[in-house]
Image: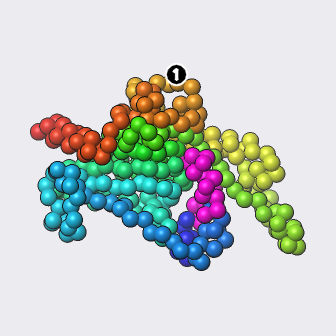
């Protein structure tokens, strides 16, 4: 089934996502889980990757040999973040593959992660961070909306740039769990669900069973709190001394527009596409000098 991997991610229910983004995508999640997505017109994203030459102009050739020296790869991370791609949106598995291709190409000096996302599945974060940890060339994050899981990726880049000083926003450092309780609907339909656990398995799914009864403490203790702490620790480690930890709401889910984000260290400066291209060139030249 085309959406089986996506449905599996949704059922896990672990999200690093901006609340508004999550709210507006609830219907999509329900459609995927119910199978209704098959009856809808699914729009395939474009511009998932591109290459610009040393002058910042698009490289139109698809043959790897047609990419000139000094080119820069651009990977677009937009919309919902998921681990496995489908017809609705590109997954981390696909976009990281593009990034690896750019990182390995001898004529590409670095790349831009063009980020405009409210986040998504927690499972989508690790592939990006693993790539950023092991890459050989510089990566600049050029961000419009950069929230939650998208921010988790953005701060892992060598340099973080806000795309503008109007709509660009950063933050929503936090984790949530979401799941649907169909118990009453089943009861109304005359369906009774029985889950029987072995005597040797009293703790299996106990956090979810408790949550379905309205007790969320174990779910927070075992899953959400450790993930939130890891998120916070990663942001602090990756932004280092640039981050002003005295700012209220910084690590607890607050959002900040570009100018404030620069002041508190979530991003390095406000720029645009041309500025991001220039920054990649600078970082690549510095790296080449250090390696001589």
- Residue 9 inside the magenta-drawn segment: yes
Residue at 54% over, 36% down:
255
Residue 65 at x, y percent in the picture = 15, 66
Is-magenta flag for residue 3? no
The magenta span reads 7-28
Quarter of the figure that contains the N terminus: bottom right
In the foreground, 195 or 234: 234
In the picture, the quarter occupied by the C terminus is: top left
Nearest the camera: 58 or 76?
58
Q: Residue at x 58, y 37 (%)?
A: 253
Give the camera-side residue of 143 and 2: 143
As drawn, the residue found furthest toward the top would be 246
Residue 200 sits above or below residue 270 on the image:
below
Percent position (x, y) of residue 104? 24, 57
Q: Is 165 situated left or right of 252 in this image?
A: left
Residue tagged by mark 1? 246
Residue 149 at x, y = what percent? 50, 47
């Amino acid at each position: 089934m085309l959406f089986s991997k996506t449905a599996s991610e949704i059922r896990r229910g672990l999200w690093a996502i901006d609340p508004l983004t999550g709210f507006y995508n609830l219907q999509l999640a329900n459609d995927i889980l119910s199978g209704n997505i098959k009856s809808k017109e699914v729009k395939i994203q474009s511009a998932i990757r591109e290459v610009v030459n040393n002058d910042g102009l698009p490289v139109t050739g698809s043959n790897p040999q047609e990419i000139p020296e000094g080119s820069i790869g651009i990977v677009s991370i937009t919309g919902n973040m998921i681990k496995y791609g489908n017809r609705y949106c590109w997954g981390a598995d696909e976009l990281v593959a593009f990034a690896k291709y750019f990182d390995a190409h001898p004529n590409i000096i670095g790349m831009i992660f063009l980020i405009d996302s409210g986040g998504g599945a927690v499972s989508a974060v690790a592939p990006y961070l693993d790539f950023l940890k092991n890459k050989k060339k510089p990566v600049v994050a050029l961000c419009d909306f950069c929230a939650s899981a998208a921010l988790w990726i953005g701060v892992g880049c060598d340099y973080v740039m806000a795309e503008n000083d109007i709509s660009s926003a950063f933050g929503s450092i936090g984790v949530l769990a979401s799941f649907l309780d169909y118990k009453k609907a089943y009861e109304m339909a005359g369906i009774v669900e029985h889950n029987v656990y072995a005597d040797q398995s009293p703790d299996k799914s106990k956090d979810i069973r408790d949550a379905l009864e309205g007790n969320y403490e174990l779910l927070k203790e075992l899953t959400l709190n450790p993930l939130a702490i890891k998120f916070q620790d990663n942001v602090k480690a990756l932004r280092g001394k640039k981050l002003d930890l005295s700012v209220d709401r910084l690590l607890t889910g607050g959002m900040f527009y570009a100018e404030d984000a620069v002041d508190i260290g979530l991003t390095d400066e406000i720029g645009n596409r041309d500025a991001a291209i220039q920054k990649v060139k600078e970082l690549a030249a510095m790296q080449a000098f250090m390696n001589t």
